[in-house]
Image (tube, rainbow, N blue to C red):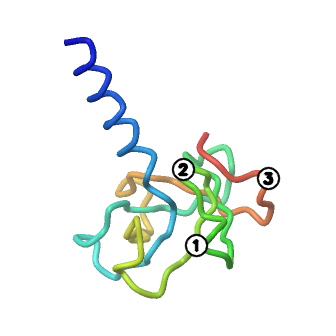
């Protein structure tokens, strides 16, 4: 019984951690996994994002995002909103890779 619980826990943790941040921008809110509002202030953000040119730098929940050209390559499809109240994730975009990550 204990082994069953351990196996289930490991599967859940493994599933959560495989979400690399390869991101595709969608034009439709209904297609999006995340609805994003970009804030002007780091203190308001849930995540600080650094945009990279290299797919290999995108790591799970690291805040380092690689923009994909094709929807099928993406782990997240995102829609950008003008309204903070619509967003389920608020981000601040940084110029420095070392600042990236969840808050």
Classify 10 Å Cα crowding around label 1: few (below 14), some (14-19), many (20 and above): many
On the image, which quarter does residue 52 sit in? bottom right
- Cβ atoms under marks 1 and 3 closer than 8 Å: no
Residue at 61% across, 39% down: 103
Residue 85 versus residue 81 in the image, above or below: above
Where is residue 15 shown, x and y percent of the image? 35, 45
Q: Which mark is residue 61?
A: 2
The first of marks 1 and 2 along the sequence is 2
Q: Which residue is mark 3?
A: 98
Q: Residues within 10 Å of mark 2 (few under 14, many from 20)?
A: some
x, y percent for residue 84: 44, 56
Q: Residue furthest bottom?
A: 69
| Residue 53 placement, left or right of 8 | right
Which residue occupies the foreground of this view, 73 or 32? 73
- Mark 1 or 3, nearer chain start: 1
| Residue for badge 1 | 66
Q: CA distance from mark 1 to mark 3?
A: 16 Å
């Amino acid at each position: 019984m204990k082994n069953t619980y351990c196996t289930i826990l490991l599967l859940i943790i493994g599933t959560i951690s495989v979400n690399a941040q390869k991101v595709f921008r969608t034009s439709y809110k209904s297609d999006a996994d995340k609805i994003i509002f970009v804030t002007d202030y780091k203190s308001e953000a849930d995540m600080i994002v650094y945009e990279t040119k290299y797919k290999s730098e995108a790591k799970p929940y690291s805040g380092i995002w690689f923009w994909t050209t094709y929807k099928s390559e993406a782990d997240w499809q995102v829609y950008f909103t003008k309204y903070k109240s619509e967003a389920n994730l608020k981000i601040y975009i940084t110029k420095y890779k070392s600042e990236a990550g969840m808050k």
